[in-house]
Image: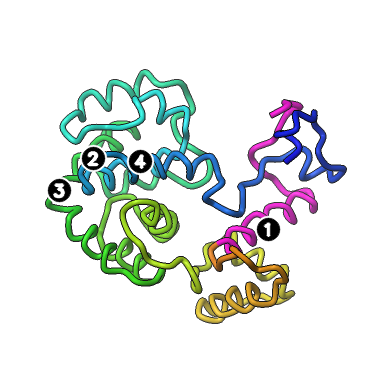
Amino acid sequence: DHRAADMPRPWTDDPVLRDYFFTNCFRELDPGTLVAMKIVQAWRPAWERLGNLILYRRLNREDTWRAIGGYVKAQNMKRLEKLLRAAPRPLFTGAHQVSALQIVVPGRDVIERQVNMMRFMDKRRLAPLINDLRRAVTAKEAYDAWLVAGIPGVGTFLSWQLALDSRYGLAEFSDHPWAPVPAGARAGLEIVLGTVGMSKDCMETEIVKLRHNVKNTRNLTVAAVEHSLCEYSKYHRITLGGHAKGKFNGRND
């Protein structure tokens, strides 16, 4: 790691890798995941940790998480709304849409909807999901548990992220050998394979095959391959002149 050696940028001659942010494909090394780990490993009831994990991944912005204190007690929803309104902008990440929450949760604006969603996160509603996660043996079972839980604002994308997050202190299933194929991974896989229009089941099979075809696969899970495909699709899009968020803008970090 060149940064660990205190070497200044640029660390690469590739203009895309040099100028744009990319997520660490090993998600346990990603700064956002490190925050999620602290949440699920906190010395709090399991249902409260789960509720905080959902809130964090809905925000998915560490600055906002620090601004609200890094952990929200279940009974402090008025304080949560006050802290969110006082927090620096932007409140939410650009990684996925949060505006869709208005479809399923009432509220006059996105902050009130977020708080109302958290009011839904009580012990009675979250306990069945916790039990399902603890019984899960595979990533597919954990993912399906999130999907059918009916958590407001948690769809297919967040169900996968939250399933993987729950492994760090709420469940013990394997994250291998399966992964879903969200839009970014689908795009990356189509570029790698040079084909389009494959079914979901075929895509999932191809990700597993891709993992087995990679040399030096120690510690490389199918989940890591899925994340790699997402980042590769972003890299490819930028090389073709496409839009991408998260530019370094000359900063040395």
Q: Amino acid at mark 1?
A: Ser
Q: Position of residue 140 (x, y in %)?
A: 40, 71
Depth check, front residue: 80 or 46: 46
Q: What is the quadrant of residue 195 in the picture?
A: bottom right
- Closer to the eye: label 3 or 1: 3
> Does label 1 or label 4 sit earlier along the sequence?
4
Q: Crowdedness of circle 3 by 10 Å Cα count: few (<14), some, many (20+)?
A: some
Magenta includes 242?
yes
What's the amino acid at mark 4? Ile
Disc 4 secondary structure class = helix
Rendered location of residue 92, percent (x, y): 45, 35
Q: Secondary structure at mark 3?
A: helix
Q: Residues within 10 Å of mark 2 (few under 14, many from 20)?
A: few
**Residue 233, numbered circle:** 1
* Gap between marks 2 and 4 measured at Cα: 9 Å
Of labels 1 and 4, the one closer to you: 4
Find disc 3 in the rendering and name its residue. Answer: 123
For the view shown, which residue lies furthest in the top direction? 86
Q: Amino acid at mark 2?
A: Arg
Neighbourhood count class around disc 4 (C-alpha, 10 Å): few under 14, some 14–19, many 20 upward: many
In the image, which residues are magenta?
A: 224-253
Q: In the image, what residue occupies the spot 72% across and 54% down?
A: 237
SS of the residue at dot 1?
Answer: helix
Residue tagged by mark 4?
A: 39
Residue matched to label 2: 44
- In this view, 12 is above or below 225: above
